[in-house]
Each structure stands twice: as C-alpha cells, then as structure tokens.
Amino acid sequence: MRTTTRFGVIGLVAVLAIGLLSAGAVAGGNSATDDVTQVGSIDASLEDEHVELDGLELSADGLPSYEIDERTYDLDSVGIQSDGVTVDVDDRTYEICSVDISLENVSVTVSDVSINGDA
C-alpha cells in the first residue's frame, strides 16, 4: 500500500509541476542574498481540494508495470522542495528553477491509470 501511495504522490506532483511549467510560471528576481540571482521559480500550494486523474499513461525504462482501475488517496500534508540548479558566471551565482510544492488536506482519485516500465 505504501508503494502505491508513493506512486500516487509522485504522479500528482509530476502532473502539477508539468502543468505549472507549461503555464509559464516563471518569475525572476533577487533572492534573500544579494550575490544570488533567482531565475525562475515555482511556488505552488493546494489546500482542501480534490484532484482527479483519469486515463493517465506513463511509460519509461526502469518504471514498474502497474495498473490502477480506480482508487482514492487522502494526503494530509506533503511538501516537496528543490533548489534547482546553481550556475556561477563572472562572480555571480544564478539559481535556476527552484520548486516548492505543498499539499494540505488533498484527496486524489486516480482511475484508468497505466504505468509501463517496458518503454
């Protein structure tokens, strides 16, 4: 059951991150320190929502094969943070695409989901 929950959370976060990136959620600016310039960041939060994933098909080498007809997961609190990539150019540090995603009291219903590791 834990492995299934991880796949649900990973799938939800991947869909949210791809959706936010494709919507052009990129903002530039200076971070808290003056010597680091932040180039693109995503801060996303979902609270008290219900998300439905229907007809999702993922295929890639290294993934297990797994089928979900219909299942609902309740997520009390999940947070994922990534500092992105830092690049140093001419004594200046650039932080590219930091991601901060938090989910609070979210239920996820997945139906007709296929994960195939034989890509």
Image (tube, grey):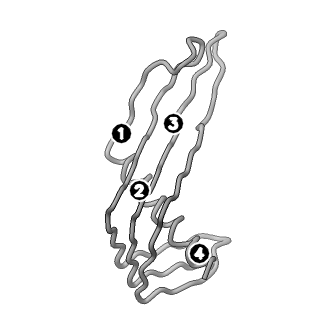
Q: Position of residue 110 (x, y in %)?
A: 40, 78
> Mark 4 is on which residue type?
Ala
Give the labeled residue for mark 2.
Answer: 16
> Helix or strand or loop: what does disc 3 sit on?
strand
Estimate the spatial distance between the alpha carbons at disc 1 and disc 3, rounded to whole Å. Answer: 10 Å
> Mark 1 is on which residue type?
Ala
Estimate the spatial distance between the alpha carbons at disc 3 and disc 4, rounded to whole Å. Answer: 28 Å
From the viewer's perspective, is the residue at label 3 or at label 4 nearer? Answer: 3
Q: Are marks 2 and 3 in contact (CB under 8 Å)?
A: no
Residue 72 found in image quarter: bottom left
Residue 43 found in image quarter: top left
Disc 4 crowd rating (10 Å Cα; few below 14, some 14-19, many 20+) is few
Q: Position of residue 73 (x, y in %)?
A: 45, 76
> Helix or strand or loop: what does disc 4 sit on?
loop
Q: Are marks 1 and 3 in contact (CB under 8 Å)?
A: no
| Numbered badge on residue 119 | 4
The quadrant of the rendering that contains the C terminus is bottom right
> Mark 2 is on which residue type?
Leu
Residue 28, placed above or below residue 25: above
Q: Are marks 1 and 4 in contact (CB under 8 Å)?
A: no
Question: Residue visible at 47% across and 67% down?
Answer: 75
96 left or right of 110 in image: right
Dot 3 or dot 4: first in sequence order is 3
